[in-house]
Amino acid sequence: MITNKTKIHDQRTGDPYIKLIDLSKTYHTAAGDFLALNNLNVNFNQGEFASIVGRSGSGKSTLMNMITGIDRPTSGEVLIKAQKIQNFNETYMARWRGENLGIVFQFYQLIPVLTLLENVTLPMQIAQKYTRTERHQRALDLLNLVGLIKVKDQFPNTVSGGQQQSAAIARALANDPPIIIADEPTGNLGSSEANNILKIFHKLSEDNKTIIMVTHDLELAKNAQRMLHLSDGNLVNDQKNSYHSYS
């Protein structure tokens, strides 16, 4: 059974959990400068399930990279729990990311020489979180949660793309992070599997986790509580969605 033993609360009651202030990112290319994000001001609250939509090149992935610290802004600030993460050095950033973020990459990023079970266990080993027995049981529980318990000992290249995607989602949850960033998390899943992942995301949100899902699929995005629309690096719409129950 997956449990959330410790809920992280923002001690400055009412403040956004994630705060993006005047955030801009410019890439310098041979063809000239490309403005990927243009002076964005966006807040995300703790326990919120939000989706970010837009066409290719709209700035969705760049925004995700800013929040995860994979890339740094040209100007502006990214504050998470009131910490300016763009000021972290690489060593501290890696440790902070392992403790606070669960990242679901669009192309899985599973380690091919490890089984699905070992892939899910690995983040806990790196973070030195839980005992060896607890890591093993938690990995089993997570694989069961995403419907992969029967293929737990398979290697990534022996299972389907959808199963690899589900394993990547289980791995993102391994360290019980307070923030989940998901890039096209259901892109390779069938409707039943995708519905299960959305159900998991809603349950995590109810457990006070902050979920940010990046997608180009408008219908998928409507399943989040809130939908933000990017276009050419600008926030052009920010709307509340009707809550979808998956219980």
Image: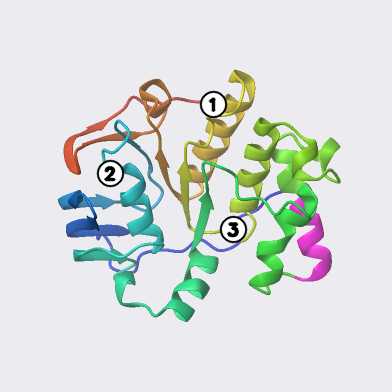
User: Which segment did they paint magenta?
Assistant: 131-140
> Which amino acid, by three-letter code, is at mark 1?
Tyr
**Which residue lies at the image location 31% right of the left edge and 71% below the top edge?**
86
**Which residue lies at the image location 21% right of the left edge and 49% below the top edge?**
31
The percent coordinates of residue 102 (x first, y second) are: 53, 55
**Quadrant placement of the C terminus:** top right
> Which amino acid, by three-letter code, is at mark 2?
Gly
Frontmost residue, 189 versus 6: 189
Image height of 1 relative to 16, above or below: above
The percent coordinates of residue 14 (x first, y second) are: 25, 58
Whether the magenta-drawn stretch holds residue 135 is answered as: yes
> Which amino acid, by three-letter code, is at mark 3?
Asp
Whether the magenta-drawn stretch holds residue 60 is answered as: no
The percent coordinates of residue 189 (x first, y second) are: 60, 27
Residue 230 visible in this rendered orientation of the protein:
yes
Q: Main secondary structure of the magenta part?
A: helix
Tag on residue 176?
Answer: 3
Could you say whether the residue bearing mark 2 is in a helix, strand or loop?
loop
Please tell me which of labels 1 and 2 falls first in the chain: 2
